[in-house]
Amino acid sequence: MIKIITVIGARPQIIKAAGLSRAIKENFGSQIQEIIVHTGQHYDENMSQVFFDELGIPQPDYNLSVGSGKHGVQTARMIEGIEEIIEKENPDAIVVYGDTNSTLAAGVAASKIHLPIVHIEAGLRSYNKKMPEEVNRIMCDHVSTLLFSPTKAGVDNLIKEGFSTENKPPYNMDNPGVFHCGDIMYDNSLYFSELSDERSSILEQNNLVSNEYVLSTIHRNDNTDQSERLSGIFEAILDLIVTFDIPFVLPLHPRTAKLLEVNLSKDLYHKVTSEKRLKIIPPVSFLDMIALEKNAKIIVTDSGGVQKEAFFFKKPCIILRPETEWIELVSCGAAQIVGWHKEKIKKAFTQYFENEHTSFPTLFGDGKAGVFMCKKMLETFENSKS
Ligand code: UD1
Ligand code: UDP
């Protein structure tokens, strides 16, 4: 039996954790004990609890209730709390997801006391260190013992930074194991897709017709915090609604909701809030989100997770960022990078609206990434005990 601590904090990590918890429960229940630590980075009911209720994730054993704050304050509080829990629980490894401040905090706390780190979603890079996430993921990768990369591009990035896929066990921080193993979110999207068909009524609730609306999400600090950028995006959306007479549904992240009135001019804010075909709704549950993704005509987003889910559900995606970690989506033509430029957004949208995109090759594994990760963790940490 090995004992792992899983650290989650932000919405996408809670959803990702459902994949691993399910793999453990279904296949390794007698071999892996999982302790869940929620840092409390996200805390609104619709940014956190809804996912536990709906996706069958065990309730967290600990909640640090750190909440929002400046990077340093937020991360420091998490480090302190996670260190205490590690000392109390004495696990064999700590599992972290992605690139948020919760990921970094767990990486710092664990590495300093020599607890092996398992990084799920290792190797992704935007090559833009002004993104807080880029710094978080680089730092975490470089202190990890097992690095699970969802894509080949991720593994190639790690190799560029001096990692090797040839390392042999026993693995440790200085001799880490690097694996290309598929995407835990692909596992989840496959698993929850049918359940979403059965349970979600989000389309009816918002008077949306399948294939006759656009789904959009916006939360990246680069877009929300700068007036010019947020305005470019919303001006483009308003123009597209009129030109194509198509509604947009926008489940709005609380960060963006708080900044809309602050960073849009009075006039633009008024237009945004009075356009009936722009349906701004609170964040939705994952089953509702899948339903919105599966039935959208086009997806317009700055989210990492939503870009990929667009691809899983064979929808063209317009990426409201100057770069992406998921470069395969762009290489195969299923997504276009447009940043926050009004005209670029409109041009890419028009192309996808007028020409159906049909190439969605298999890029993210076989839907069994979670099982692969559990096997590797067992091999690595059971052997390190003997
Ligand atoms: C964080 C991650 C980002 C990830 C995103 C997923 C970092 C640095 N960023 O960004 O990589 O893509 O989560 O959604 O870790 N807020 C609420 N209620 C909540 C949570 C947040 O109102 O439950 C508001 C607060 O005003 C807060 C702001 O959103 O200050 C930003 O939250 P924070 O967790 O700091 O960053 P995100 O933008 O959510
Ligand atoms: N998501 C959700 N409800 C929403 C918006 C997003 O369930 O209202 C899900 C989405 O399907 C994806 C994840 O949250 O699985 C992405 O999270 P987010 O966009 O906040 O962060 P990122 O992936 O950019 O880090």
Image (cartoon, rainbow, N blue to C red):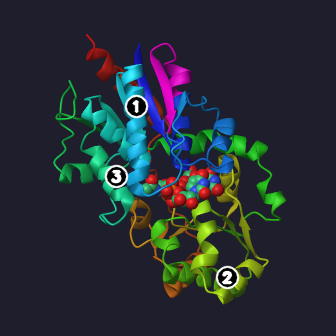
Disc 1 and disc 3: Cα gap in Å? 21 Å
Dot 1 crowding, Cα within 10 Å, few <14, some 14–19, many 20+: many
Query: Nearer the N terminus, badge 1 or badge 2?
Result: 2
Q: Nearer the viewer, mark 1 or mark 2?
A: 2
**Residue underneath mark 2:** 269
Residue range corresponding to the magenta coloring: 23-38
Q: Is residue 211 left or right of residue 73?
A: right
**Residue underneath mark 1:** 373
At which x and y percent is residue 239? 65, 86
x 80%, y 52%: residue: 201
- Give the quarter of the image for residue 269: bottom right
x 37%, y 32%: residue: 83
- Give the quarter of the image for residue 255: bottom right
Dot 3 crowding, Cα within 10 Å, few <14, some 14–19, many 20+: many
- In the figure, 280 relative to 58: above or below? below
Visible residue check, residue 308 = no
x 45%, y 32%: residue: 6
Mark 1 touches mark 2? (CB < 8 Å): no
- Give the quarter of the image for residue 115: top left
Looking at the picture, tell me which residue is in the foreground, 255 or 357. Answer: 255
Disc 2 and disc 3: Cα gap in Å? 33 Å
* Kind of residue at disc 1: Met
Looking at the picture, tell me which residue is in the foreground, 234 or 329. Answer: 234
Q: Secondary structure at mark 1?
A: helix
x 20%, y 24%: residue: 170
* Kind of residue at disc 2: Tyr
Point out which mark residue 136 bears.
Answer: 3
Some atom of ligand 1 lies within 8 Å of the CB belonging to the residue at label 3: yes
- In the figure, 21 relative to 140: above or below? above
At which x and y percent is residue 159? 20, 49
